[in-house]
Image: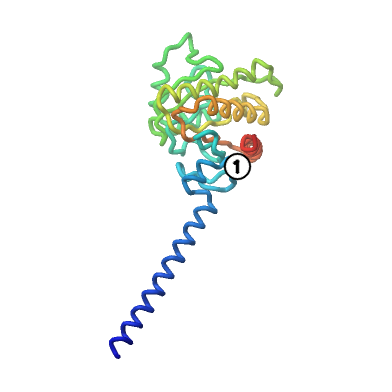
Amino acid sequence: MRLVAIFKKCLAVMIVLCFVFLQSRVSMVAADIGNGSGENSEKSSKTAKSGKICRRTGLHGKRVKIADTEVVVWKGDITTLHVDAIVNAANSSLLGGGGIDGAIHSAAGPQLEKECRGLPAIGEIRCEVGDAKITGGHNLPAKFVIHTVGPQVSAGHPSSSDSKNLKNCYLSCLDLCEKFSIKSIAFCCVSCGIYGFPNNLAAKIAFGTVKEYLKTHPKTSLDLVVFCVFSNEQLNLYDGELDSVANN
């Protein structure tokens, strides 16, 4: 009888432990589904998600899937990003300047300027407006820097030619991604700031160009595109464009 009583107690303890284990597993699965982190929900989701973490970079930000590529909006320092390539809003000499151009050259170290000086040039022009050139990242976390020269806008009123050149900046960068099998890229806000391109129109061109490219290149090497913004105004505009992309 004593052995039977001990057996019953052991059996009761085992049942309780099994129940606790199963309950914890159910909670974990429910959390995964709620966060959209399960593989199936990640691939099928088109809705822009706010405040989620990009699993590839660990970045907090609004994100959406376009085809098989994750697109993220993030406010912060582009020189700190652990992606394959970051985009530099450069001048035509590619030798550094103010704003993001100067910040990238400073973080990358003097070897970046040295490599840029070695690129083919006509006079001091190493990259035309709307084109892009690629170099190593040197001291940056990114493996590559893609330098693109955006249009300079007079009085904040871009012409149709300016808009076309800005679109070409993004296309040139995306083409280099394919050529070098780049899987993740972070764009800065090309031509904004001292180059005078209005933030709202620049955001529309950036998102529209990337969306069209990803949808028409289903076998792209890219699985992550980050739009890295600097100001709260840009963050709100780019978040709005991301919502628009998600709903169309």
User: Residue at the location (63% across, 39% down)?
Assistant: 239
Give above or below for 117 relative to 200: above
Residue sticking out furthest to the bottom: 1
User: Is residue 96 placed above or below 79 in the rendered structure?
Assistant: above
Q: Is residue 28 above or below residue 98?
A: below
Image point (41%, 67%), residue name: 21
Residue 43 x/y as whole percent: 50, 41
Spot occupied by residue 39 in the image (x, y as percentages of width and height): 46, 45
Q: Residue furthest top?
A: 122
Coordinates of residue 220 in the picture (x, y in percent): 46, 27
Quarter of the picture containing the C terminus is top right
Instruction: Categorize mark 1 by other alpha carbons within 10 Å: few (<14), some (14-19), many (20+).
Output: many
Foreground: 61 or 221? 221
Q: Which residue is mark 1?
A: 48
Q: Position of residue 1 (x, y in %)?
A: 30, 90
Q: Residue at x 47, y 25 (%)?
A: 146
Residue 238: quadrant of the picture: top right
Q: Nearer the viewer, residue 141 or 186?
A: 186
State the colouring used for the structure image: rainbow
Amino acid type, callout 1: Ala
Q: Quadrant of residue 236?
A: top right
